[in-house]
Image: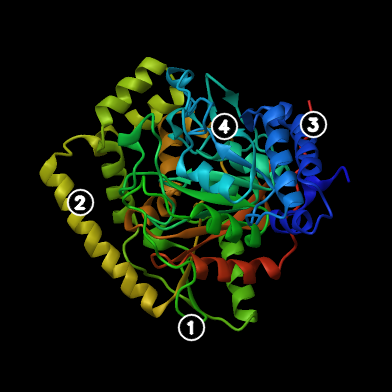
Amino acid sequence: MSDIWRLSAVELASRIRNREVSAVDAARSALSRLNAVNPTLNAVIDHRPEDVLAQAADVDAALARGDALGPLAGVPVTVKVNVDQAGYATTNGVNLQKDLIATANSPVVDNLRRAGAVILGRTNTPAFSLRWFTGNALHGDTLNPRNPSLTPGGSSGGAASAVAAGIGHLAHGTDIAGSIRYPAYACGVHGLRPSLGRVAAYNAALPERSIGGQLTAVSGPLGRTIADVRLGLAVLAAADPRDPWWVPAPLVGPDAPRRAALCVNPDGMETEPGVVKALLEAARRLADAGWTVDTLDAIPPMQEAADLQIRMWMADGYDAMLAAAEKEGDQGALVALRGQRDKAAGADLSNFSAALTRRATLTRLWELFFAEYPVLLLPVSAELPFPDKLDLQGDAAYARVWRAQMTQIGVPFMGLPALSVAMGSAMSSVGPSPVGVQIVAGRYREDLCLAAGEVIEAAGPAISIAEPELR
């Protein structure tokens, strides 16, 4: 069965458990797909076929012994190159870290391996994971498999490009300001940013930048079905003592009314018609399934949350980040950092304390909102996916990019979960473009995001696997 790579993660795991497909055959199929399309996409920047096949053989041997298998046993998945995988460089897309070889796995990789997953390869990211575009001097540029004129998103652009094109059945990404949700949106797949504390974070090489806390990028799954994303979350959310911020919250919370709010122009966001059309269609699908959907002109503050998130994010070691970017010489990272200099400037202890106090207030307002509306439909971005490298086309283009991403930046300030749901395609200035919607819920209520996402997914066509024009 040469096209095993086309199966969903859930279906492949079932077939391997039932001995309809061997893990080694699944690994060979995944490697064949990678070899076919990755030279064009450059989504996976490091993989070792012998290691992949050895992992798969271990799964088959465990199955033959009758050992208990994890929920992802034998399923090829990818991991982002900014998390530790023993024996591999945690480059984060920069030459400065090309020899930073991990001696142990991050919690993310350990949890995937304990679940039986086969790590297929490591996916690309922009330098320092700082942009909504994916390219760097060390690994090169990643292409969007659905339209190479568009960004694949960032910073988990390699992850989204890979899973959209059938390289792996599930992908790992990280998100501090849209880095899972936007690549999923741009590449036409689903992507979940979990609540702060849901998934343990730790990189031994750079521990001060990788343990919990408000400013850490949260790990989450990207997949071609909501069921796969749900399974990925369950695996990634396992406990790990290395992250003191990890929260033992249940994956399924109390019953909630099937009630959603829709806001197409949060805080005056100038949402373009193609995105509005997708939001209205998502709302219609929920309503047709028996949900109550109310259209709101006003929701709790989002622009203020985005401004404060940028300030806290950029002020957290801004001078050191800028110095590292200057040493690396990466244009994209320098543009991203220099463009936010004003927000980072003057972030002294009193300002930082005030931001933390305001975060508590805003989080309270949002939790009260979700007590009335368990689910909120928002734009992922004010625009359809950007032309690639738009942020490097001058000050006006840079400002346009950051302005359009307000909801992606604001949601993490309150530690909320958010799901990017693919909604097919629309026409952009550079041709056919993926489009999607964002579903937000209260803290640790990823189950509500996923439940609404499943309803929306079920009422539309299945996500197709991208077939890029091969070089």
- From the viewer's perspective, tell me whether residue 49 is left or right of residue 29: left
Q: Position of residue 369 (x, y in %)?
A: 35, 73
Q: Residue furthest right?
A: 1
Q: Mark 4 or mark 3, which has the lower sequence index?
A: 3
Q: Mark 2 or mark 4, which has the lower sequence index?
A: 4
Q: Residue 355 got which mark?
A: 2
Q: Residue 124 got which mark?
A: 4
- Relative to the observer, which residue lies in front, 461 or 221? 221
Q: Name the amino acid, label 1.
A: Pro
Q: Mark 3 highlights which residue?
A: 36
- From the viewer's perspective, tell me whether residue 342 is left or right of residue 234: left
Q: CA distance from mark 2 to mark 3?
A: 48 Å
- Relative to the observer, which residue lies in front, 278 or 354? 354
Q: Mark 1 or mark 4, which has the lower sequence index?
A: 4
- Relative to the observer, which residue lies in front, 377 or 140? 140
Which residue is pictured at 28% across the width and 69% down the height? Answer: 365
* Labels 1, 2: front one: 1
Q: Secondary structure at mark 2?
A: helix
| Picture quarter with the C terminus | top right
Q: Name the amino acid, label 4.
A: Asn
Q: Mark 1 highlights which residue?
A: 257
Does the image show residue 384? no
Q: Name the amino acid, label 2.
A: Ala
Q: Residues within 10 Å of mark 4 (few under 14, many from 20)?
A: many
Q: Secondary structure at mark 3?
A: helix
Q: CA distance from mark 1 to mark 4?
A: 40 Å
